[in-house]
Amino acid sequence: MKILLMADVKGHGKTGDIVNVSDGYARNFLLPKGLGVPADANSINAATVRRGAEAHRKQVQKENAHALVNEMSGLTVKVYAKAGENGRLFGSIGVAEIAEALKKQYDIVVDKKKIRIDEPIKSLGVTDVTAHMYEQTNAKFKVEVLPINQ
């Protein structure tokens, strides 16, 4: 029996695949659990449309990520923090503060989970930061930590 898989099934295929399985396996396991539907013309057409829509959505995400990377590359984000006389910060600057500063200064919204720094910034100065926007698409920018004037 030909089945269109609606979910990944170990040993048989991934979502959207059309597989040939035994009648008993289809009737007793795949169909009752909603893991697959009989592969008729309507379900095959619906799966094709779904695959096309998914491919289009991924393409749009990729284009948006590339546009955002081009916009962010070379930016210098200024973050203000309290610092001691020797340039050490009281506390540290993390990815949340960097994401907030990007939004305030350049109106660029970046999820803090996408910003990559090796360790929190604990001193004044300029630090290189990377933001992973999409698969193999990274934006490199600088974060300048300045002291708060007291």
Image (cartoon, rainbow, N blue to C red):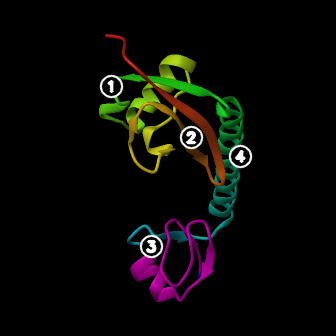
Which is more toward the observer, 120 or 106?
A: 120
Q: Is residue 83 left or right of residue 142?
A: left
Question: Quick one: label 3, few (<14), some, or many (20+) residues within 10 Å?
Answer: some
Locate residue 150: give its quadrant.
top left
Q: Which mark is residue 128?
A: 2
Mark 1: secondary structure: loop
Q: Position of residue 136 (x, y in %)?
A: 66, 54
Which residue is farthest front?
Answer: 86
Residue found at x 36% / y 16%: 148
User: Which residue, given by chain and number where applicable, does mark 1 sit on?
Assistant: 85
Mark 2: secondary structure: strand
- The first of marks 3 and 4 along the sequence is 3
User: Which residue, given by chain and number where applicable, does mark 4 sit on?
Assistant: 59
Q: Position of residue 129 (x, y in %)?
A: 54, 41
- Would you place residue 8 above or below residue 63 in this image? below
Residue found at x 65% / y 40%: 65
- Would you place residue 29 above or below residue 41 in this image? below
Q: Is residue 7 magenta?
A: yes
Which is more toward the observer, 84 or 146?
A: 84
- The first of marks 3 and 2 along the sequence is 3
Disc 3/disc 2 C-alpha distance (Å) = 53 Å
- The first of marks 1 and 4 along the sequence is 4
